[in-house]
Image (cartoon, rainbow, N blue to C red):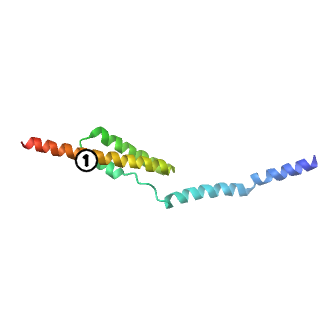
């Protein structure tokens, strides 16, 4: 019994030691300091807001929502999700700007006649 209590006590000592706590602190510190250094993916929020001035309303709003979701994912540390959502926000914003420009040009050309 003496051998088991010594070995059990010896095995239990390292997990309760301060080194385990320091590892926990090191990982959280490394995570919080490494995220800003890696360069967050773009969320294209300015482009999405600019696209809201075009007359393709459902598409604009969806692009804006994807942009905000991309920003939230980036802040939570999900860089792959933030990149994916950012690309979708960029695509929707560009499509809505192009379609909005076509609609505006058609409206002006038809109203001038």
- The number of numbered discs placed on residues in the rendered structure image is 1
Could you tell me residue 112's position as x and y percent? 7, 44
Which quadrant of the rendered structure holds the C terminus? top left
Is residue 29 rendered to the left or right of residue 99?
right
Nearest the viewer among 73 and 28 is 73
- Furthest-left residue in view? 113
Nearest the viewer among 45 and 94 is 94
- Furthest-right residue in view? 1
- Furthest-bottom residue in view? 37
Is residue 79 rendered to the left or right of residue 112?
right
Residue annotated with mark 1: 98
At 68% across and 58% down in the image, what residue appears?
A: 22
Could you tell me residue 103's position as x and y percent? 20, 42
SS at circle 1: helix
At 38% across and 46% down in the image, what residue appears?
A: 88
At 86% across and 51% down in the image, what residue appears?
A: 7
Nearest the viewer among 7 and 94 is 94
Could you tell me residue 74's position as x and y percent? 47, 51
Task: Check disc 1: other Cα within 10 Å, few if <14, some if 14-19, many if 20+.
Answer: some
Looking at the image, residue 65 lies above or below residue 75: above
Nearest the viewer among 92 and 24 is 92
Is residue 23 rendered to the left or right of residue 45?
right
At 49% across and 59% down in the image, what residue appears?
A: 36
- Furthest-top residue in view? 58
């Amino acid at each position: 019994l003496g051998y088991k209590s010594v070995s059990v006590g010896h095995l239990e000592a390292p997990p309760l030691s301060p080194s385990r706590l320091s590892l926990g602190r090191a990982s959280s510190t490394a995570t919080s300091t490494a995220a800003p250094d890696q360069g967050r993916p773009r969320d294209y929020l300015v482009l999405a807001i600019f696209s809201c001035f075009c007359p393709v309303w459902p598409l604009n709003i969806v692009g804006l929502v994807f942009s905000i979701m991309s920003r939230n994912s980036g802040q939570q540390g999900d860089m792959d999700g933030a990149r994916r959502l950012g690309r979708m926000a960029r695509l929707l914003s560009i499509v809505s700007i192009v379609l909005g420009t076509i609609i505006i040009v058609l409206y002006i050309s038809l109203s001038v006649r």
